[in-house]
Image: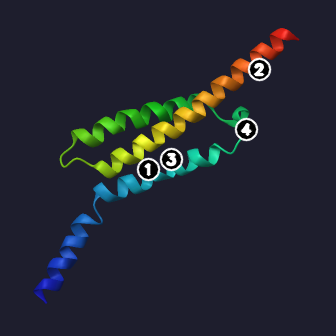
Amino acid sequence: MSKLKLLYNSVKTNAFSIMFWAPLANWGFVLAGCNDLKKLPMYVSEKMTAVLTVYSLLFMRYSLAIKPKNYILFTCHATNTIVQSILLYRKLKFEADNKKMLKNN
């Protein structure tokens, strides 16, 4: 009985801690960003994408500054930074191409 209780307490303290649920919830940003990659650049919000990029950069640093280091959170935010940077690049390129096209016409 005591081994079962030890296992239960271990799962309770580790699996249901903030070190697990925070990264799990943040993967939603990555999935949403991946979904936005399918959209045309004109439908992507430039400001929101820039904010999410900075947010992920800041929390990459935070995930390594806390003790114990949260490598799952770091990986999540690193992936989100990449996805959001791609979206931001596509949006800025789209805007620049539109300005060139309007200038030429």
Q: Answer above or below: position of 15 versus 101.
A: below
Quick one: label 2 or label 1, which is nearer the N terminus? 1
The reply to whether dot 4 and dot 1 touch (C-beta < 8 Å) is no
The residue type indicated by label 2 comes to Asn
Q: Which mark is residue 98?
A: 2
Residue at 64% of width from left, 24% of height from top?
92
- The residue positioned 18% from the left and 85% from the top of the image is 4
Q: Alpha-carbon distance for marks 3 and 2? A: 28 Å
Horizontally, residue 66 falls left or right of residue 46, namely left
Q: Mark 1 = which residue?
A: 26
The residue labelled by disc 4 is 40
| Numbered disc 1: secondary structure | helix
Q: Residues within 10 Å of mark 3 (few under 14, many from 20)?
A: some
**Front disc: 4 or 3:** 4
Identity of the amino acid at label 4?
Leu
| Left/right of residue 62 with respect to residue 40 in the rendered view | left
